[in-house]
Image (cartoon, helix red, strand yellow):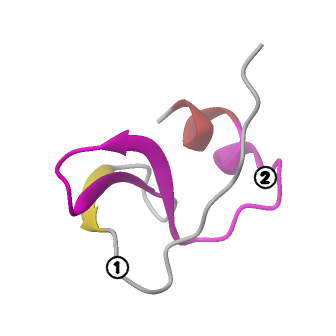
Amino acid sequence: MLLYTNLHSENIGNFNDSFYWSSSETTISSVKCINFINGEITMLEKNLAGVRTRPIHYF
């Protein structure tokens, strides 16, 4: 949610209006995703095409 709030909504980082994977698995076959159209967190199947990724380095 912070990525959406701090970056996408401020037009920083060239994020598309799409779903982005988080690093959090919810089950063996699904993962938490951030919907960059509205900022909501949702669970999607891992094999779903069209979900984007954005590597982030944590210090």
59 on left or right of 32: right
Tell whether position 30 is magenta: yes
On screen, 19 above or below 50?
Answer: above
Please tell me in which quadrant of the rendered image residue 33 appears: bottom left
Q: Nearer the viewer, residue 1 or 49?
A: 49
* Quadrant (top left/top right/bottom left/bottom right) for the C terminus: top right
57 on left or right of 26: right
Tell whether position 23 is magenta: yes
Find the distance from the CA under tag 1 to the CA under tag 2.
Answer: 29 Å
Q: Position of residue 2 (x, y in %)?
A: 55, 30
Secondary element under disc 1, as helix, strand or loop, is loop
Residue highlighted by disc 2: 11
The residue segment tinted magenta is 7-35
Q: Which mark is residue 47?
A: 1
Q: Residue at x 67, y 32 (%)?
A: 6
Q: Residue at x 72, y 21 (%)?
A: 58
